[in-house]
Amino acid sequence: MGIEKLKVQWKEIGKLSKRFKIKILRGSEVEILKDGSLDYPDEILKELDIVVGAVHSGFSVPKKKMTERIIIALENRYLDILAHPSGRLLGKRKAYEVDFGKVFDTAVANGKVMEINSQPSRLDLNDELILLAKGFGLKFCISTDSHSIFDLAFIRYGLGQARRGWLEKKDVVNTYPYSNLKDIFKKLKF
């Protein structure tokens, strides 16, 4: 989505928040580019309540290069969540090579959250990586990566992944009341 279209969306979100008297967060999934930068400039990223970063291309780089790319992204103060952290597509594409110990260590040091993607074609993170990340003290969000309202039902698969990774309610930010999210996503405006 281009920046101008994104700004139009922000205005609509503001109108809907007022109309329905609920807080709707402004968020976007952004591309983690090959050099680890994000595909929106910081002046746009800082206006978003939630920034989800993902690798969508350049999967076949060496492990060291992919690890550096993700670490640079995690060090961006505007990134909040690392989406589908292994990049796998079940039956289509293996996970890319990355040093998850270094990625998780950097995520903890920078207050980032790991996504558990519920799409049946992803189920990413897998249960072993969830358990490993939990050992680092990371928090998680369970997303459906919905492309239609029907995809919201996929949440059950993400919950299954979380259970297999031994997560508890306190580990999953989806379970937090809105007022507590400010401790996780420090830039939220209340």
Image (cartoon, rainbow, N blue to C red):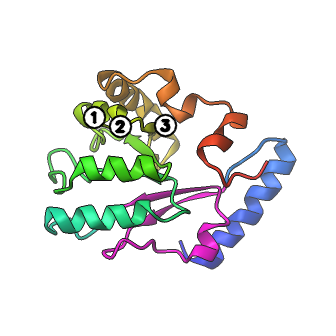
Report the front residue among 156 and 94: 94
Q: Residue at x 34, y 47 (%)?
A: 104
The kind of residue on which mark 2 rests is Phe
Q: Earlier in the sequence, mark 2 or mark 3?
A: 2
Mark 3 element type: helix
Mark 2 or 3: in front is: 2
Q: Is residue 52 magenta?
A: yes
Mark 3 or 1: in front is: 1
Q: Which residues are magenta?
A: 26-55
Q: Earlier in the sequence, mark 3 or mark 1?
A: 1
The kind of residue on which mark 1 rests is Leu
Mark 2 element type: loop
Q: As displayed, is residue 56 above or below residue 168? A: below
Q: Residue at x 36, y 32 (%)?
A: 134
Q: Are marks 1 and 2 in contact (CB under 8 Å)?
A: yes
Taking the image as shown, residue 78 lies to the left or right of residue 118, namely: right
Report the front residue among 188 and 87: 188
Identify the residue under disc 1.
132
Identify the residue under disc 2.
136
Identify the mark at residue 94; answer none if there is no mark.
Answer: none
List x then y, in percent, for residue 102.
28, 52
List x then y, in percent, for residue 25.
68, 50
Gap in angstroms between the C-alphas marked 1 and 2: 7 Å
Q: As displayed, is residue 89 above or below residue 134? A: below
Identify the residue under disc 3.
152
Q: Quadrant of residue 121?
A: top left
Q: Residue furthest front?
A: 109
